[in-house]
């Protein structure tokens, strides 16, 4: 399974992946998921928010255990973020069936759509729509860099954008969701597998810096209204403020107009990703960055702190022999679903801590340990 997915959406010049939502590469990943479901004789369906489901057992029984992750990527992302959870879910199901340990509940494997938000700017779109955390009208109007709306992109891919929205009937059928994911730091140490305790609160903010376009070679420095200066100062200030607060602040995306080498910019649009261990610290940090930036700022998304279901978390950790339990600064579909159903996460060791990069990696032995751990906890829950 892993080898089959590796070429899909890979950008040869960088070695990274460009599996953005509702593109041809995403379509190939979705076709792969459907093929895996059908070759195992699982019931396959796509919900009205574009999430893919593969069911072992009766989907309507109302007491399902669900596992899975996502298959889309950030721009030039790594091979493990998302796909490891989906591949491991199918492999864990295979292991359970081989030993006849399928239990009495239905088991579903899910591929949530547009988890990264790389194309339309809102992370975890599929799970946010499913839980009602994202308003359907707003979701349909989200645009990519080319001006294509999410609604239009879904329609081109054969999905009805008018049907999206909170799915109470489906949520009521889920008793628990367990997501396996590559660790996006290097905090597991010598342990190949760990359990998540919480997700830091995090969000995305768009900063618009305005200036005046002019000639780079004839305009005196004192006559310039250069928004690039305010942007650069804000990047440095965000870094220092985050350091002092023990938090994180990253400007990783920027758009410049008119974007000419010999022209002073008229406008700089930049996106801040900020995260902290608690909401008060995050709110204070972002307010300080905004206040000192002089920019027009729009909050595009925000996810409060997620404390994973305590009894479920403790049950997983105990069943796996007391593996490390640790928080993460990365957002996941499990964090979104936590508002509606009991959720938990397993982490597979990342030896370098590098993620959202072509250098992202996990050793095969650790990946296999992750499959074994997932199979163990699913067997216990089923």
Image (cartoon, rainbow, N blue to C red):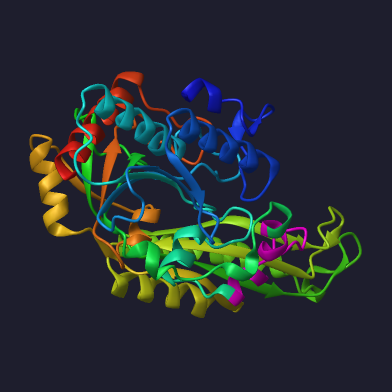
- Percent x, y for residue 7? 61, 25
| Residue 59 in view, yes or no | yes
Nearer-the-camera pick, 341 or 225: 341
Q: Which residues are magenta?
A: 137-154
Q: Is residue 104 above or below residue 295?
A: above
Q: Is residue 85 above or below residue 365?
A: below
Q: Is residue 50 above or below residue 39?
A: below
Q: Is residue 8 left or right of residue 332?
A: right
93 in magenta: no
Residue drawn at x 38%, y 32% as measured from the top left = 90
Pick the quarter of the image with the C terminus.
top left
- Percent x, y for residue 272? 53, 63
| Residue 230 in view, yes or no | no
Residue 378 occupies quadrant: top left
146 in magenta: yes
- Percent x, y for residue 82? 45, 41
Q: Is residue 377 above or below residue 310?
A: above
Q: Is residue 259 left or right of residue 3?
A: right
């Amino acid at each position: 399974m892993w080898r089959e997915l590796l070429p899909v959406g890979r950008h040869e010049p960088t070695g990274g992946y460009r599996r953005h939502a509702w593109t041809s590469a995403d379509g190939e990943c979705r076709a792969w998921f459907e093929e895996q479901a059908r070759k195992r004789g699982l019931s396959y369906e796509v919900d009205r928010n574009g999430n893919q489901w593969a069911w072992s057992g009766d989907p309507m029984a109302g007491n399902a255990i669900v596992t899975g992750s996502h298959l889309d990527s950030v721009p030039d992302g790594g091979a493990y973020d998302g796909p490891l959870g989906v591949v491991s879910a199918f492999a864990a199901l295979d292991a359970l069936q081989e030993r006849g340990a399928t239990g009495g509940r239905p088991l579903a494997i899910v591929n949530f759509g547009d988890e990264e938000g790389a194309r339309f700017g809102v992370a975890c779109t599929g799970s946010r729509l499913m839980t009602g955390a994202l308003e359907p009208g707003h979701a349909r109007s989200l645009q990519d860099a080319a001006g294509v709306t999410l609604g239009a992109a879904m329609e081109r891919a054969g999905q009805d954008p008018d049907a999206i929205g909170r799915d109470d009937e489906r949520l009521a059928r889920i008793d628990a969701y367990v997501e396996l994911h590559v660790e996006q730091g290097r905090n597991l140490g010598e342990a190949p597998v760990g359990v998540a305790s919480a997700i830091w609160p995090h969000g995305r903010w768009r900063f618009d810096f305005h200036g005046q376009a002019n000639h780079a070679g004839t305009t005196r420095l004192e006559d310039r209204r250069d928004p690039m200066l305010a942007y650069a100062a804000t990047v440095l200030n965000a870094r220092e403020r985050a350091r002092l607060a023990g938090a994180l602040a990253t400007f990783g995306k920027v758009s410049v107009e008119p974007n000419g080498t010999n022209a002073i910019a008229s406008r700089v649009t930049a996106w801040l990703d900020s995260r902290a261990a608690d909401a008060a610290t995050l709110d204070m940090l972002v307010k300080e960055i905004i206040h000192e930036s002089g920019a027009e700022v729009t909050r595009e998304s925000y996810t409060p702190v997620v404390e994973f279901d305590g009894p479920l978390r403790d049950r997983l950790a105990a069943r796996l022999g007391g593996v490390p339990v640790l928080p993460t600064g990365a957002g996941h579909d499990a964090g979104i679903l936590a508002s509606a159903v009991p959720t938990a996460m397993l982490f597979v060791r990342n030896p370098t801590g590098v993620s959202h990069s072509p250098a992202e990696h996990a050793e095969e032995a650790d990946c296999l340990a992750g499959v074994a751990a997932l199979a163990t906890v699913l067997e216990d829950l089923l």
